[in-house]
Amino acid sequence: MIIPLLVTACSGPLSILDPAGTAAAETAPLWWGMFGFFTLVLFAVVLAFVYAVRRTPRSHTEPGPDTSESDTPQLQRQHQVWIVGGGIVLPVATIVTLLVFGIPAGNRMAGVGIDPDQALHIEVTGYQWWWEVRYPNLSLTLRDEVHIPAGVPVRLHLTSADVIHSFWVPRIGQKLDMIPGHVNELLLQADAPGIYPGVCAEFCGLAHAHMKFSLHVHSPEDFAAWQTAQQPGAAE
Amino acid sequence: MNDFQQPDQNRHDRDQELHRGLMAIWSNLPGWGSLSAVNHTTVGVRFMVTGAVFFLIGGVLAMLMRSQLALPDNTLIDAALYNQLFTMHGTVMMFLFAIPVLEGLGIYMVPKMTGTRDLLFPRIGAFGYYCYLFGGIIIMYSLFAGIAPDAGWFMYTPLSDAEFSPGRGSDFWLLGITFVEISAVSAGVELTVSILRGRAPGMTLTRMPIFCWSILAMSLMIVFGFPPLILASILLELERAASMPFFNVAAGGDPLLWQHLFWLFGHPEVYIIYLPAAGVVSTLIPVFARRPLVGYGWVVFSIVLMAFISFAIWAHHMFTVGIPVAAQAFFSIASMLVAIPTGIQVFSWLATLWSGRVVFALPMLWIFGFLVIFVCGGLTGVMLALVPFNWQVHDTHFVVAHMHYVLVGGMFFPMMAGLYYWLPLFSGRMPSENLGRWGFWLTFGGFNMTFLLMHLTGLLGMPRRVYTYESGLGWDWLNLLSSVGGFVMAAGIAVIIIDIAMHFRFGRKAPQNPWQADTLEWALEAPPPPYNFISIPSVSSRHPLWDNRNLAQEIAAGEHAMADFEHGRREVPYTSGLDARPQSIVHLPGNSWIPLQAATVMAVLCICLLTRWYLLAAVTAVISGVMLLRWSCFNGAHPQSAPVNDKRADDLQLHSRTLDGPGIRGMKVTIMADATLYLCLLFGWIYFWISPDRPLPDQMPLDVSVMVACSLFVLLANLSYLTAVRRAKAGMGTGLEYRLWLTCAFGLLHCISLAWILVFSPLQFTTLTHDALIMFAILYLMFHSVLALFLTLIQIQRYRAGYVSELLPYEFLVLAPWWIYTTVIAWSVLIIFAGLPMLWPIG
C-alpha cells in the first residue's frame, strides 16, 4: 500500500523521479541510492547521540567533572576509533562509492562518446520571458515549443539575448544555463513520444515564474512528417 | 572574634576599592553618552540585539512568502513584491543577521574566555557596529519605500545591471551591503589580532578554548572571504553608475566573472556562519558531559581544514553554467571532502557524550536539534556535490531545503543553545526550563515540517524564486504543509522571545557558574562588569575553572596580575602568539565619539551615492577621510592616551614604547584583506585575457615610460621611509624629519605622475572592459598612494609634537607595511596591467 502511494507522490509532469529521458533516468537511481544510505547514516548518528545522552544521565546537582586523567589507554583507543572511523573512514568510503556511480553517470549525461554531428541540432535563445527555438537546417523558428524525435540524441545550443535563463525539462534531463555571450551545448534524449513541460530554472526577473515551454517528442515517423509539414510551401 | 574578622574586612574593602577604581576607568558614559561606548561587552551586545531585530524582520518576510506560496495561483502578493521579499529575506538573514550576530558573540565572548579585559581595537568595534546599524537601516528603508533590490541576494548580472534593473534597488544592495561589510572586515581584523596577541598569560594556543579557535577561523575567513564581494560590488556599482563595463558582454566583460567573485565570497560565507556555531557546540558538549572534549587536536585540525577547503569549492554553485568537465570534477570532489572535517567534529562530539555522563539541560535540547538538522543538511550537501544529481536539482526547492537545513541547523540552533547557556552570565538569572522546551519543540517541529517536505517539492520539479505555481503539478499539498510549518516555527520563536523577556523579571538568581563550566568567562560575576576581570589570571590548562575551584574568588580579590587602576588607563596584556608570554601592556582608548561621528559621515556618503549627488558625495568622502585619520591622533604618547612620562611599576612596558603592538599586527591583517581584493582584481584581469573574442583597444592606452617613472618614485619614497624607520629604531634622531619630508616629496611626485596617467591616457573606460579594468587598477593604486602620503604627513606632525621619535618609534613601524604594500601594487600594476598587453600584442 505504501509503495503505490510513494509512486504516485513521486510522479508529476515536472518530477525528476519520473524519468522519461536517458539523462533523467541516470539521476533518479542516484537519488534513491543516496537517499537510502544517507537515511541510515542520519538515523545511526541520531541514535548514537540519544543513547550517549541517556546511557548514564547525571542530575544537575551532581558534581563533576570527570577530568581527562581518568581516560584509560583503552578509552583513548576507543576515541581514536570513533574519530578516525566516523570522521575519516566513513566519509571517504561514501565519497568513493558516490564517485564510482556518479562519474560514469555524469559522463553519459554530458554525452561523452556521442558524435555531436550526428545529432539533430537546435538553437534555443532565452528572452525575458520566452524561448526562441531555431532549427538551422530547416530554417524554421518556433516560440516556446521544441519538437524532437524520440529515441535519438538531440543537440541544443543554448544562449540568451538578455539576462541569464536556464533550460530545463525535468523528466527528460539536466538543466543548463543560458548566458549572454556564451553558447552552452546540451545533449538530450527522450524515450517515448509525448508532451513534456519545460521551465526556466534561473531567476530572470518579473515573469520568471511564467517562463515555460513544452517539449513535444514525436516518434521518428511523426517527426519526419512534422518536419515536412513545417517546410515552406507545405500544405496550408 | 573581631580579631579574626578584621583581615576579611580589609580584604573586602580592597576588593571594593579595586572594583570602584576599575569602574571609573572602564564604565560607559551615562545616558546618551553611552553612544560613545567602545567596551567590547557593550558593543557585542549591541551587535547581537540589532541582529536579533533583523532576524525578526527577515522572518516576517519569510512568513509573507510562505503565505503567498500556501495555495496555487494565489494572488496575495504579486511578482514585483515577491521578488523584493526573497531578495531581502536572503540579504537580511545573511548580512544583517547571521554574520553580525556571530561577530557580536565573538566580540562579547572572546576577551571573557581568554581572560582579558577588552579587544585590542575597541574603537574599531564601535565603528563597525555603527556602520552595520546605519547600513542596515539604509537597506531596510528601501523595503519600506517599496524600492528594495529585487534581483536576488546573489545579484547576478545582467539582471542586476542598469539595463535590466533601472531602479535604485540594486544600488541599495551594492552600496548598503558594502557599507555593512566594513563592519565585518573590521571585526575580522579586530578579532584576529585580539585572539592571537591579547590572551591572558599562559593561555598557549593549545590551551585556547575551541570557541576561540572557531572565532579565529571565522575572522581570518572574513579577512580573506569578504574582499571578493566588496570588489565585485564596487565594480558592479561602477558599471551601473559610471557606465564602466566590467560584466557587459558587448564591451568584453562576462557575467560569469560576477558569479565567480560572488561565490568566491559566498561559499566561505557558509563556513563563516557554521564554524563559530560549531565552536559553541564544542564548548557546550564537554560542559554538559562534564568531561574534556574528546580529540581537541582533531577538532582544531578540522576547523583549520574546513576553513581552507571552503575557499576551493566556490564553483559548486555554478555546475549548471557550463564550466569545463574537469573543473566540475575538481569542485565536486573538493566539496565532498568537506564531509571529512564535519565528520571529525560530529564524531568527537559523540565520543565526548559517550564517555561522559550527561546533564540534559535546555541548551542540550537545542544541541540535539542542531545535530538532527545539521547532519541531515550535511548529507543532502554531499548529494548536491555529486554533479549529475546537482544538474537536476540545482535551483529547485530541494536546494532551498538543503540550504535552510545547513544554515538554520548549523547556525540558528547552536546559537539558541549558546543563548540559553550564556543567558545566566549575561543577566544573572536562570531561564525557565518549561517555556524553553515548548519553544524548542515548536521551532524544531515547525522547521522540519516546512523544510523536510520541501526536499520533495524540489524533486517534483518546483524551481526556486517563483512567486506562484499552477495546480496539478503535485506541489499543492506540500506547499500548504510547508507554509503551516513555517507558522508553527514562528510560534516557537514567539514563545522563546516571551521566555527570555520574562526571565529578566521572574528568572531565579543564577548561582556562580551554574553549569559548572571550565572556561574563564564563568569566573566573572553576572552580569559581567565592563572591565571583566579585577585581576588577570595566569592560565595553565584548557580547563582553568575545573583545575582551580577558587579561581573566581582569587580573581575578584585581585590576587592575580594587573590589579591596579591608579594610572587611570584601560590596560590589557599583550602576549606572544603561540605561547602567550607577556610582552607589554596595551593602553586602550576609552569612550570615544569618533566612531559614531565617522560612521555617520560615511552613512551620509552612502546616501549621497544612492541619490547620485556626486558633488556632495565628494565633500563627504573628504570629511570622512579626515574623521578617520583624526582617529589615530589620540594614540600613543598623546596627552589623552599615555603621555611620555607615564611609566609602569613592573617590568612590562606600555606597548607604544616598544617595537611591537596591536597596531602593527592590525595593519598587516588589514593589508592581507586589501591584497585579497587586489588579487581578485588580477583574477578579473586574467579572466578577461583568457576569454575568447574580447574586444581590445587599437593601441596600448598607457604610456609605459610614465608608468615606469611613477613606479620608481614610489620605490624611492618607500626606501626613504624605510631608512627613516631603521634609523629611528636604532635610536638615531638626526635627519629623521628630513627623510620623512623626502618620502613625502617622492610620494607627491608619484601621485602627480599617476594623476597625469589618469588624465592624459586615452582610456575608453566606458566602452571597453579592458580599459575599465586598467582604470580601476590605477584608481586603486592612487587611493593607496594618496593615503600613504597623508599618513606620512601625520607622522611628521606627530614627530614635531613629540608623540613619535627615535625613542618612541612604534608608530613609524605601524605605517611601514602600508608603504611596502603600495610599492608592491605600483610595480605589479606596471608589470601585469601595462606589461601583459605588451606580451599579448594588440592589433
Image: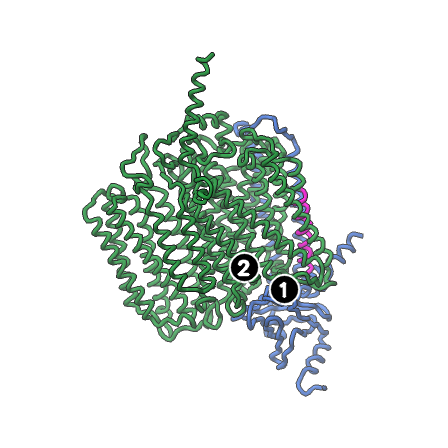
Chain colours: A blue, B green
Residue at the spot 68% in from the left edge and 80% down from the top edge: A227
Position of residue B835 measured from the top left corner of the image (x, y, whole percent):
34, 66
Residue at the front extreme of this rendering: B31
Residue at the right extreme of this rendering: A1
Let me know if marks 1 and 2 both belong to one chain. Answer: yes
Residue at the spot 45% in from the left edge and 39% down from the top edge: B30
Q: Earlier in the sequence, mark 1 or mark 2?
A: 1
Q: Nearer the viewer, residue B220 or B366?
A: B366
The residue tagged 2 is B142
Q: Looking at the picture, which amino acid does disc 1 mark?
A: Ala
Q: Nearer the viewer, residue B798 or B463?
A: B798
Q: Is residue B699 above or below residue A99?
A: below
Magenta-drawn segment: B441-460
Residue at the spot 60% in from the left edge and 33% down from the top edge: B507
The residue tagged 1 is B79
Q: Is residue B673 magenta?
A: no
Position of residue B815 measured from the top left corner of the image (x, y, whole percent):
31, 49
Image quarter of residue A124: bottom right
Badge 2: chain ID:
B
Q: Looking at the picture, which amino acid does disc 2 mark?
A: Ser
- Let me know if residue B329 appears in the view: no
